[in-house]
Image: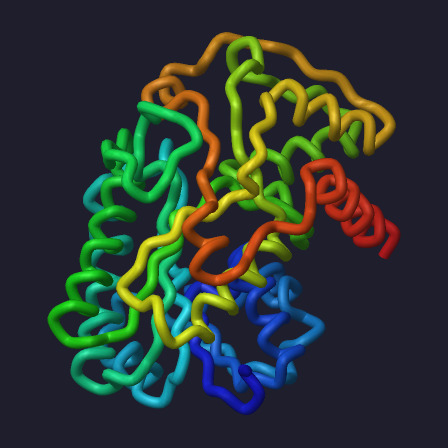
């Protein structure tokens, strides 16, 4: 489906973007990624395919550069942005500038120069806020509790508005807690499984907020990438929003115990919720994935224990090298 297709991945050095770029190259796509910086560490993320992709150092807010990149793209995966619910409160205006203005610039570029492009935007399960019922389907009320989630919801509405007004083919994925193999697991404070794995492999104790009974829904990165490629390749369901997760709940404390079992060592402690995290905590969450199953015939293949095993195996190989 993607052989010789021109694909633009904004934020292509990030966790999701780097996995997506690798998979697109495997499928023969002509991939261009944007990144804010190309320091030595960032280069290592895509080291194995750097000679097969085009890397552009560009901020999503650079209108002229984004206009030029959008003109020839057949598929756009709009992954650039500033992440983190807690961090978003530190500088709300910066978060607004990057996470709203930047994506609006991209949509305007599509309107002006490329109405035929297919655009996928990753929303977040945090748009729902504290769930009223579980599992959470697409019709659940939206009540975001952080600046990050408010801006994600705003861009979701931008995408749907541009679809209805101009016919730009957009689709939104409200993603729940992705995890999996990544070159620099310690860099992302909001990727909790990766960080717990890394700390436990280093012999450090991990801290659980509260008693660990909070329920989460984690999706392995390979399942997420498979779904993203399916959504972009389809021709029927543009202007739709899909809830994306594994659909199988697990308590935080059980997730940690699974990691300790797989790693073969480690300890955890339960500590009181830090105030900054307590303010954005949304409570238990499980994804209802019936819509994406029905529309696209997709369902996740990798359970939490298998996903943790794959991540640990990857990191052990990295350490040896």
Find residue 82 and report its horizontal and vertical position in percent: 36, 50
Res. 37 visible in picture: no
Q: Residue at x 57, y 44 (%)?
A: 219
Q: Quadrant of residue 145?
A: top left
Q: Residue at x 52, y 81 (%)?
A: 31
Q: Quadrant of residue 206?
A: top right
Find residue 54 and report its horizontal and vertical position in percent: 52, 82
Report whether 302 appears left or right of 107. right
Q: Quadrant of residue 29?
A: bottom right
Q: Nearer the viewer, residue 214 or 243?
A: 243
Q: How many marks?
A: 0
Q: Image height check: is 300 above or below 282? A: below
Q: Residue at x 29, y 77 (%)?
A: 66
> Where, quadrant-wise, is the N terminus in this rendering?
bottom right
Report whether 320 appears left or right of 16. right
Find residue 196 and report its horizontal and vertical position in percent: 66, 31
Find residue 163 and report its horizontal and vertical position in percent: 20, 69
Q: Image height check: is 154 above or below 85? A: below
Colouring rule applied to residues: rainbow
Q: Residue at x 17, y 83 (%)?
A: 112
The outermost residue toward the front is: 294
């Amino acid at each position: 489906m993607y052989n010789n297709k021109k694909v633009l991945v904004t934020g292509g050095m990030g966790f999701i973007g780097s996995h997506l770029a690798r998979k697109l190259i495997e499928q023969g796509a002509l991939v261009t990624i944007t990144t804010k910086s190309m320091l030595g560490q960032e280069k290592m993320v895509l080291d194995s395919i750097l000679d097969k992709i085009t890397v552009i150092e560009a901020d999503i807010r650079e209108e002229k550069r984004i206009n030029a990149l959008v003109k020839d793209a057949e598929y756009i995966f709009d992954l650039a942005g500033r992440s983190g619910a807690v961090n978003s409160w530190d500088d709300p205006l910066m978060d607004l500038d990057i996470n709203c203005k930047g994506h609006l610039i991209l949509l305007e570029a599509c309107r002006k120069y490329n109405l035929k492009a297919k655009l996928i935007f990753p929303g977040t399960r945090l748009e729902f806020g504290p769930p009223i019922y579980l599992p959470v389907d697409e019709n659940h009320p939206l009540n975001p509790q952080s600046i990050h989630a408010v801006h994600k919801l705003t861009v979701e509405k931008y995408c749907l508005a541009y679809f209805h007004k101009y016919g730009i083919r957009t689709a939104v994925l409200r993603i729940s807690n992705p995890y999996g193999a990544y070159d620099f697991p310690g860099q992302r404070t909001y990727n909790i499984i990766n960080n717990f794995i890394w700390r436990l492999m280093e012999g450090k104790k991990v801290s659980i907020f509260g008693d660990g009974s909070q329920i989460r829904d984690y999706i392995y990165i390979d399942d997420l990438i498979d779904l993203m490629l399916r959504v972009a390749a389809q021709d029927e369901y543009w202007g739709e929003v899909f809830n994306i997760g594994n659909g199988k709940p697990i308590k935080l404390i059980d997730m940690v115990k699974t990691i300790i079992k797989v790693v073969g060592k480690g300890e955890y402690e339960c500590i009181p919720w830090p105030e900054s995290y307590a303010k954005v905590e949304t409570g238990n969450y499980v994804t209802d994935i019936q819509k994406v199953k029905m529309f696209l015939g997709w369902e996740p293949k990798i359970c939490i224990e298998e996903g943790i095993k794959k991540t640990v195996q990857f990191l052990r190989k990295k350490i040896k090298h």
